[in-house]
Image (tube, coloured by chain):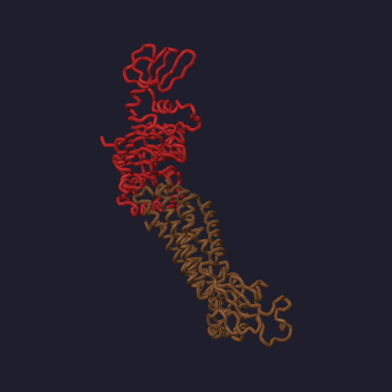
Chain colours: A brown, B red
Amino acid sequence: MIWLAWRQHRKQALFTAIGLALLAVLMVPTGLAMRHTFADLGLDDCVGALGTASVIPADADACGRASIQFNGQYSVLTMIGVLFLVLPLLVGLFWGAPLVAREIEQGTHRMVWTQGVSRGRWALVKFGVAGTVALVASVVYGLGVSWWLTPMSQAGQHGRFNIFFFDMQGTAPIGYTIFAVTLGIFAGTIWPKVLPAMSATLVGFLGLRIALTTLARPHYLPARVLTFPVKDAAEQTNPAAGDWILSYGIRDASGKMVTANAQIACAPDATGPGAACGADLGITSGAYNWQLYQPGTRFWLFQAIETGIFVAVAALLLLLAVRRIRRVA
Amino acid sequence: MEIVLETDQLGKRYGRAWALRDCSLRLPAGRVAALVGPNGAGKSTLLHLAVGLLRPDAGAVRVFGRTPYDDIAVLSEVGFVAQDTPLYRDFTADELFTMGTKLNRRFDTALAHRRLAQIGIPRDKPVGKLSGGQRAQVALALAMAKRPRLLLLDEPVASIDPLARREFLQALMGVVAETGTTVLLSSHILADLERTCDHLIVLHASQVRLVGDVSALLTEHRRLVGPRDGGSPPAGVAQVVRAEHTDRQSTLLVRTNAPLRDPAWKAYDVTLEDLILAYLGDGGSRPHAAWEVAA
């Protein structure tokens, strides 16, 4: 039975391998180049010195200029990286959806289910082979992208906790891929034609991903609040902390939001144009910076939660798919 | 007499519509049975129930005394060729036979090779590139290599040309003679059945209309021609299956239960085709186009 599943799907497996190889050709040289630049700019040491605390002393950020230079040099790559977000979906569309749908569309399920193997075993082996290939591919992809993105995250422009960047590294892509494949399989048992199954996979995948990312992920754990003064600021947020900032702004002494999406820190002895320290914006004495955030140290915990949710949904879909298969003829 | 396939009040429903209803029949071992009926009569449904692809909604189906649904013990004794002879089109015949050995406890690859060699079908070409007739032969070889005690064929010759059809049926008769396998073959091409089948099951509008041994059925049915309005049919007629009238005379297709002696009626033998059409005609709702008589 494993022979059959492999023989049927070896072409797709080959394409998957070629896809990963192409990805590696793109990522390995650029990843090495980024690391090289990162080290040349001295970012290794200064990022290390910043640590992972959410706030640091106001005069601590020695990496600013080097970070800006680094980010300027590699911002294009970051945008290319965002394209990797669709890869789990592609696996679901081209691995998962045709798995059962094509058999039923072409009627071959009636041939293979009337050999001497039960439907349950057929499903188990076929899903197992597809799942294993998808798992291997997604582990390589997830860890590869993590490695590739590390310098960009550390340079502070795109923290690894940010939407999009969180989604394409670590274990999350593994969960997405497994989910996409099982969604494709399940869709194929409901709409036993390849194209409708693919469309349903596309809609279902994007739907759940967007809903969870925007509505659920910020609340996996209670967010923390951080405040620090506007005037006489002795501290500032740490760009290397990798915090996921959900919202921020400046509140006045009574706690009312004065200016959303702004952050001001004035030195005690400020002079020149900045000396007013936001007085023209209505910022009065006693105002403070406020931010709602998920600490960067929760990254792996959030990765585990996100992966867990998608793996659980995948398991449920698989169960439903097997039940459906027992009723198809 | 061993009964290979037995159904009792068998029914299958899709949504609210019954695809098959109150189907009771028994198929003895060693027969080559034709399952006949127009499109949508429930032929495929009956075969799918028999091979365990479907689960009945009413009644029971037994193959070798077992319920076939998802039962490997039944599957290993049954060969099945589904409608349009589906095969993995990118597989070669050799790869399909390898699949057969991997998926069945008993699989006679040598038999399959011999069968394809006899009719000259290449084993190393993807079956998607073979002709429809050749593909049907590969599907038959794949099913026969299981050495099944029951072979179920769902319209195996419907989509292939007359010459290939005859070759296919010859091949089928060859293996039947060799192995003694019981065969249940659905078709709506009547002329083929007369040559190949010795048992008949007529399905119409989801119900069984006629079951039995072909020669016995042909013996007990007669076409009677007599005067119009001769009153009641003559003695010896058990059932008038179909009546046609012109101004002067009536033609009846009847089932008899005793010799006919009334001199007013002339009795003729019936052909299998007459018989099938008579049993299918009574509904009156059947569109004529549903029938292909001997392409």
Query: Vertically, is B107 above or below B202?
Result: below
Q: Residue furthest left?
A: B1
Q: Which residue is pictured at 39% across the width and 29% down the height?
A: B209
Residue B150, x across and y down, in percent: 32, 41
Say which quadrant the N terminus of chain A sits in: bottom left
Decide if residue A11 is in sight here: no
Query: Vertically, is A168 above or below B123?
Result: below
Decide if residue B255 is in sight here: yes
Query: Is A211 left, or right, of A103 in this rendering?
Result: right
Residue A323, x across and y down, in percent: 41, 51
Task: Report the number of numbered marks.
Answer: 0
Query: Vertically, is B96 above or below B287?
Result: below
Query: Is B190 left, or right, of A194 in this rendering?
Result: left
Q: Residue furthest front?
A: A254
Quadrant hosting residue B3: top left
Query: Is A235 left, or right, of A300 in this rendering?
Result: right
Q: Which residue is pictured at 68% across the width and 80% down the height?
A: A285
Residue A304, x across and y down, in percent: 47, 69
Q: Residue furthest bottom?
A: A269
Q: Residue A155 versus residue B193: which sits nearer the camera?
A: A155
Say which quadrant the C terminus of chain A sits in: top left
Query: Is A234 left, or right, of B143 in this rendering?
Result: right
Q: Residue B45 versus residue B59: which sits nearer the camera?
A: B59
Q: Residue A43 versus residue B177: which sits nearer the camera?
A: A43
Residue B263, x across and y down, in percent: 36, 11
Q: Residue B88 versus residue B254: which sits nearer the camera?
A: B254
